[in-house]
Image (tube, rainbow, N blue to C red):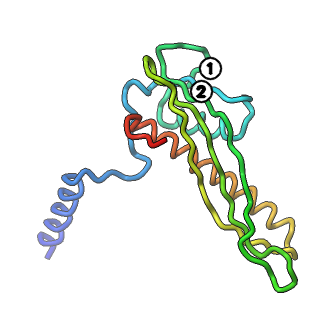
Amino acid sequence: MKHLSLLLICSLSLMLTGCGFKLRGSNSLPPQMQQIQLQATSDYDALYQVVKTRLQNHQVTVSTDSLASVPTIRLVKDELERRLLSLFTSGQVAEYELVYTVNYLLMLPDQEAQAIQFDIVREYQDDPNAVLAKSRELDLILKEMRTQAADKIIRQLANPNEITR
């Protein structure tokens, strides 16, 4: 029985590696992306801080100097839009759709700059009786959406030729 389970585990792991399966977030960046210049309107911008931290977690050297020989990410704009989804019978808002839009430019050496935009969408249930708790929950959701946006930017950097505009 032990041999059968060992054989099953080995064959399963062999099939997973053979098909090219990788855990999400384990994608390594190509060598030309090991040093990146990161620009934003402010060094204190929340998305800038998250992208910088996530890049450093991937062992990427983040530069603020203008170097033409390294790829550049310019965070142009990020904004949160709240759309009404549903109402309580009293007419108060019950549910929102949160749309976090990110615009950035990817400038690779000797190539034209690529303007990239994407949205991260979440739903948020409001409760007028718990305003403080819901305010904190909204802050947490926004922080998670920024982290998702930073991870998406890094995934796009891993495959710069496959970026959709």
**Residue located beneath label 2 in the image:** 38
Residue 133 to residue 111: above or below: below
In the image, 21 versus 70, the foreground residue is 70
CA distance separating discs 1 and 2: 6 Å
Q: Left of 20 or right of it: where is 101?
A: right
Residue matched to label 1: 64
Mark 1 surroundings: few (<14), some (14-19) or many (≥20) residues within 10 A: few
Q: Which image quadrant is residue 142 in?
A: bottom right
* 1 and 2 marks in contact (CB < 8 Å): yes
Instruction: Give the residue drawn at x 78%, y 78%.
Output: 87
Dot 1 or dot 2, earlier in sequence: 2
Q: Residue at x 86, y 74 (%)?
A: 128
Relative to 124, residue 81 above or below:
above
- Amino acid under disc 2: Leu
Q: Residue at position x 52%, y 37% from top?
A: 57
Which SS class for mark 1? loop
User: Is 160 situated left or right of 11 in this image?
Assistant: right
What kind of residue is marked 1?
Thr
Residue 4: image quadrant is bottom left
Q: How many residues crowd mark 2 within 10 Å: few (<14), some (14–19), many (20+)?
A: many
Locate residue 159, reporting x and y percent: 39, 38
Residue 17, given in percent of the width and then of the height, sits at: 23, 52
